[in-house]
Image (spheres, rainbow, N blue to C red):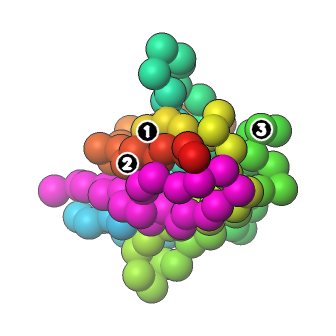
Amino acid sequence: QVQLVESGGGLVQPGGSLRLSCAASGFTLDYYAIGWFRQAPGKEREGVSCISSSDGSTYYADSVKGRFTISRDNAKNTVYLQMNSLKPEDTAVYYCAAGRCGSSWPYWGQGTQVTVSS
């Protein structure tokens, strides 16, 4: 059974950091690009970052560039999103997905809540 499970969300003060994890089971992550997406209340889901399967190229939304870092550990079948200098506008449910950067995402996790507030 193909499954993606996010973890690491929580409540953090502005300027703080969190590291999200996306663990895969039932398939090998290194065959897929992994993307992180987020959806805030009342807003559409947006792409945050993506890491390719082929050469590990990374992509970031302008809103998180310089603050977020995506990485993958194929040995652990896990992808991470390190989030630094968090802002209240980063508050959202964060999802990871397996597929292809800029294309389709057939597999999705259930999401993890990130709340940035003082």
Give the residue at x 64% y 61%.
Answer: 16
Give the residue at x 65% y 34%.
Answer: 89
Q: Position of residue 53 (x, y in %)?
A: 59, 62
**Local crowd size for mark 2, using a 10 Å CA cut-off: few (<14), some (14–19), many (≥20):** many
Distance between mark 3 and mark 1 Cα atoms? 16 Å
Query: Observer-nearest residue: 109 or 32?
Result: 109
What residue did someone put label 3 on?
63
Mark 3 or mark 2: whose residue is earlier in sequence: 3
Mark 2 residue type: Thr
Give the residue at x 36% y 66%.
Answer: 23
50 falls in the magenta region: no
What residue did someone put label 2 on?
112
Determine whether 106 is above or below 70 in the image: above
Q: Residue furthest front?
A: 118
**Local crowd size for mark 1, using a 10 Å CA cut-off: few (<14), some (14–19), many (≥20):** some
Q: Position of residue 48 (x, y in %)?
A: 64, 42
**Local crowd size for mark 3, using a 10 Å CA cut-off: few (<14), some (14–19), many (≥20):** few
Give the residue at x 52% y 78%.
Answer: 73
7 falls in the magenta region: yes
Distance between mark 3 and mark 2 Cα atoms? 19 Å
